[in-house]
Structure formats: C-alpha cells, structure tokens
Image (spheres, rainbow, N blue to C red):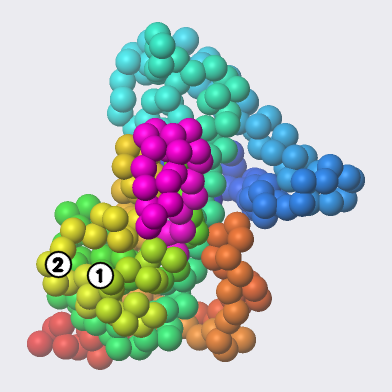
C-alpha cells in the first residue's frame, strides 16, 4: 500500500497494478541491502542491492522520458501544477536550481525510500502497539465514532476530518517517539562549538540518534511507556526532544505526506477490522528501518459493527 502510494504520488510511476508486486520486490532488495558489507561479490548483499538499484533507475528513467514527452506535447500541462507528483515539480526547476536526469533519478530513489520504507515501518509499529494496548485502541474507536466514521454515515474521509482526530494523531506521535522509522541522522558542523566539555571543530560531521534522544529526554516522563495521552497536554516546545523527521532546514520534506498517510491507515485499520499477531510478541530489528524479524504474520477479521450501529441509530 505505502509503496504504491509513494510510487504514484511522489514519483508518478505509470505501471499496471499487477506490476507493483514485482516492482516492490526489486525495491525491497535495494532497501534491505543499504547497510550491507561493502564487498562487491556476486550473490552478496552489495551486488544484489546494486543490481536492484540499476533496475529501479531504469524504471525511473522511463518515467522521466514519459513526463518530458507529455510536457512537450502539452504546454498547458507543463505550466499547470494541478495533480502533479513531487518528481514533476522537481523537473520544473530552472536556472541554478535545475536538476540533471542523474540527480532527479537519485532524488526519486530517496522519495521512494522515504515514502515507502519509513511509512510502512511506522504503520507496522501502529499495528503492533494498538494490538498490545486495547485501551488505546478503544479510545481511537470512540474518537472515530464521535465523527461518525465507524458506524455512522460519514464513511468517506476528508482532510478536515483527519486533522480533527486529535487522539489518533497523539497515538501516531507516540509510536514515532518509541519506534522512529529512522534511527538517526548526520549534520555538518558550520561553526566550532563546545558540548559537555568537548570541542567539536568546524567542518566535522556529527551523528545524532533520534531513538536515544526520544528515550532519554526529560520531556517524556516514563519514557519507555506507551502513553499517547502525553501529547494531549500543551507542554514545552519539544523541537529538540522529539525529532522523528529530523529538524532544521533539512527536516524530512515528506513529513506531512507521511503523517496524513498514517492517519488514513489508522482510521481504515481500526474501523474495518480486529486483528491478532499469529506469533505472539514479536522481536524487532532496526536496520534499515524498525521491522519485526518474523515479518509480522497477522490474522485480520472484519470488525462487527452491529452494536455500534444500533447505538448510532438511537
């Protein structure tokens, strides 16, 4: 689901639905070998990842050429921003900001990784945490009920409704605090500074841990506890304590896209089904993104809405 969404909304892939499973398989080989041993030997991770990358870049090049043909044939399409994907907007850059095809292809791979791998990781974590905390799940259901999104007539979602789901948003924020899809980031030091008695020179590259920041910050009492309610109270500015999307001018550009996709996911998941984890408690691996080691086999059952429909009719 998240790969299809990222491929269409961010990159603008034009492929038949039956082609997506194969394309997703190629992308997962690429993503799963991002942190492999740097040994370019046949059959090993780096060789598999490079081969998958080559196939993805070929597909992206075809997409770029198709967009250029469409723009050349229809000048009004080139000037219009309606219904555009992110790649189309990047292609419009001109002058000093103009991007080469090579740069556009690399950016497209970044967009696919950010739009699929990280969002899918967060969605998986939501499935786990909502299953583990039935009280939180019930609160989400009650909030959706309050907007008529479960048993009422308002089955279609609007952006305005999604933005009003305060508790659902708090659940997503808490999952991203405990299980951030990206574990850390890098920044270049632009001015020498001192931290805890250590001098960090200008020009150095520093790494920061998102996960450790979240789990050690004094802003989050009982920081190992899953508690969405902590986000409902208006507290201090958390911008240096909560950073699942990074921070500063290089904050993740897909932040709003990811948060919106996760809200839609939670609504559809909770109001449509109940579920159980077939292997019980799961063990997590954290590279390239947090994911269950066992692949998280889940048994879904259609949610029985009879009682809620009867209550809504009263």
Identify which residue, 306 or 279, lies in the foreground.
279
Q: Quadrant of residue 175?
A: bottom left
Q: Which residue is mark 2?
A: 235
Task: Tell me if 177 is positioned left or right of 87 in this view.
Answer: left
Q: Quadrant of residue 232?
A: bottom left
Image coordinates of residue 139 in percent, x first then y, are 24, 82
Range shown magenta: 188-211
Residue 52 in the image: above or below residue 79: below
Residue 171 in the image: above or below residue 161: below
Is residue 11 at all visible to an observer of this figure? no
Image coordinates of residue 222 in percent, x first then y, are 31, 82
Identify which residue, 256 or 231, lies in the foreground.
231
Q: Write the residue at 28% across / 71% down.
A: 218
Q: Write the residue at 37% across / 66% down.
A: 214
Image coordinates of residue 129 in percent, x first then y, are 42, 79
Task: Tell me if 295 is positioned left or right of 234 in this view.
Answer: right
Residue 230 in the image: above or below residue 313: above
Identify which residue, 65 or 37, lies in the foreground.
37
The local crowd at label 1, few if under 14, some if 14 to 19, many if 20 or more residues have their Cα within 10 Å, is some
* Label 1–label 2 contact, CB within 8 A: yes
């Amino acid at each position: 689901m998240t790969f299809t969404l990222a491929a269409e909304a961010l990159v603008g892939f034009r492929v038949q639905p039956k082609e997506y499973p194969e394309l997703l398989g190629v992308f997962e080989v690429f993503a799963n070998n991002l942190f492999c041993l740097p040994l370019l030997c046949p059959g090993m991770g780096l060789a598999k990842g490079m081969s998958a990358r080559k196939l993805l870049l070929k597909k992206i090049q075809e997409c770029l050429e198709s967009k250029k043909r469409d723009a050349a044939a229809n000048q009004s399409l080139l000037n219009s921003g309606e219904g555009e994907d992110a790649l189309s907007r990047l292609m419009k850059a001109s002058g000093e900001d103009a991007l080469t095809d090579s740069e556009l292809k690399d950016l497209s791979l970044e967009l696919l990784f950010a739009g699929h791998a990280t969002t899918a990781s967060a969605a998986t974590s939501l499935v786990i945490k909502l299953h583990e905390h039935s009280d939180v799940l019930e609160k989400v259901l009650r909030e959706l009920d309050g907007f008529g999104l479960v048993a009422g007539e308002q089955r279609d979602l609007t952006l305005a409704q999604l933005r009003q789901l305060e508790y659902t948003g708090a659940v997503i924020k808490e999952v991203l605090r405990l299980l951030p899809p990206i574990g850390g980031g890098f920044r270049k030091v632009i001015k020498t500074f001192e931290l805890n008695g250590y001098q960090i020179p200008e020009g150095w590259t520093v790494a920061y841990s998102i996960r450790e920041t979240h789990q050690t910050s004094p802003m989050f009492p009982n920081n190992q506890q899953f508690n969405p309610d902590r986000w409902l109270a208006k507290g201090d500015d958390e911008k240096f304590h909560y950073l699942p999307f990074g921070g500063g001018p290089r904050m993740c550009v897909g932040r709003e896209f990811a948060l919106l996709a996760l809200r839609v996911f939670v609504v559809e998941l909770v109001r449509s089904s109940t579920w159980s984890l077939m292997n019980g408690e799961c063990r997590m691996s954290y590279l390239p993104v947090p994911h269950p080691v066992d692949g998280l086999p889940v048994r879904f059952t259609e949610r029985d809405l009879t009682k809620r429909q009867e209550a809504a009719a009263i």
